[in-house]
Amino acid sequence: MITFKISEKEGLKYSKESGDINKIHLDKITGYNSIYGNKICHGTLVFLKYLKFTNKLKKISNQDEYSLKINYKKAFQYNQKIYISKNFTKIFQKNDGKADVEFYN
């Protein structure tokens, strides 16, 4: 199983680079008052980190080209381990399935 974390510092940097300045990702009070109770990671940042492992995925699938779809079910939190399942189809945090990934040839 592959694991990684996203720090608040990475989230701030990504916010500046992407132009996504939604306070749910940046402001402690906004995050606290949201339905999540905390600031949350940018979903696209989680996805970009996931894509870093595509070379390994190519070896597993024996495919040079494929399409994929990601379905976010819950928000990801900063500074907590994020796990990618061995078959790359599930992304977890705290044993909770946060996103599903589907592959297409």
Image: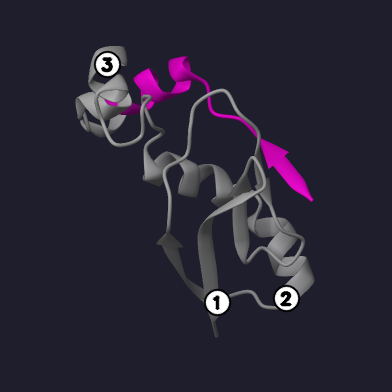
Disc nearer the start of the sequence (2/3): 3
What is the CA distance from the residue labelled 2 to the residue labelled 3?
A: 40 Å
Please name the amino acid that badge 3 sits on. Answer: Asp
| Residue toward you, 61 or 64 | 61
Disc nearer the start of the sequence (1/3): 3
The residue that mark 2 highlights is: 61
- Callout 1–callout 2 Cβ contact below 8 Å: yes
Please name the amino acid that badge 2 sits on. Answer: Ser
Q: Residue at x 70, y 67 (%)?
A: 58
Percent position (x, y) of residue 14? 36, 27
> Which quadrant holds residue 63?
bottom right
| Residue toward you, 33 or 63 | 33
Of the 4 image quadrants, the one containing the C terminus is: bottom right
Disc nearer the start of the sequence (1/2): 2
In front: label 1 or label 3: 3
Residue 22 appears left or right of 10: left
| Residue toward you, 36 or 71 | 36
Residue 89 appears left or right of 68: right
The residue that mark 1 highlights is: 103
